[in-house]
Image: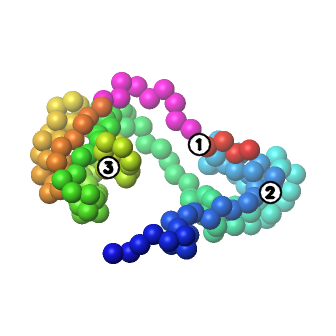
Amino acid sequence: MKKYTESSEMEYTEEIVHIDELDKKILQLITKNARIPFLEVARECGVSGAAIHQRVQRLLNIGIVSGSEFIVNPNKLGFNTCAYLGIFLEKANYDKKVVEQLKEIPEVVECHFTTGAWAIFIKVQAKSNRHLKKIIDTDLQAIDGIARTETFISLDQVFKRQIPIS
């Protein structure tokens, strides 16, 4: 059994990276619009396009930014039910085995280890309440290690945002 020591804390602590004002300005612009051309960012920041390219590459390399993405609207594809499920495990050490099986369910779009009542908290996009029930009854309850689930259906997403860059 591995005992907790102050030195072992370092392996669980994320290194905080300090950035300057130019990096902050770049982040503010690209998080508002990931498709903004680097030349437009350069004009806004008063530097060359090459400087922006180098700065963005550095932000990617040090892990502050992890790429860019197109956001798919699930409703437009017929996935009209968004639900959050708290998962109770039979034993705490089943967590990794359960997560590996959750990855096999395409409708599970987020998965978090949590404190509190549940061991795992997931977000599910389903086509309907009936589809959600099928996912719970057939897919989730078939996973060894899940004792039970608690479901919350989202009525509407009011907003979603990035952390503030200040």
Magenta highlight on residue 138: no
User: For the residues marked 3 and 2, what is the alpha-carbon distance in whole angstroms?
Assistant: 36 Å
User: Is disc 1 in contact with disc 3, using a CB cutoff of under 8 Å?
Assistant: no
Residue type pointed to by label 3: Ile
Magenta: main secondary structure: loop
In the rendered image, which residue does mark 3 sit on?
A: 120
Q: Earlier in the sequence, mark 1 or mark 3?
A: 3
Of the residues under marks 3 and 2, which one precedes in the sequence? 2
Q: Nearer the viewer, residue 95 or 32?
A: 95
* 1 relative to 83, above or below: below
Left/right of residue 141 with respect to residue 116 in the rendered view: left
Q: Residues within 10 Å of mark 3 (few under 14, many from 20)?
A: many
Q: Which residues are magenta?
A: 153-162
Read off the residue under disc 2: 20
Pick whichever of labels 1 and 2 is earlier in the sequence.
2
Q: Which residue lies most toward the top here?
A: 155
Q: Residue at x 29, y 40 (%)?
A: 85
Q: How many numbered marks are there? A: 3
Q: Label 1, on which residue?
A: 162
Specify whether 150 is left or right of 48: left
Q: Is residue 117 visible?
A: yes
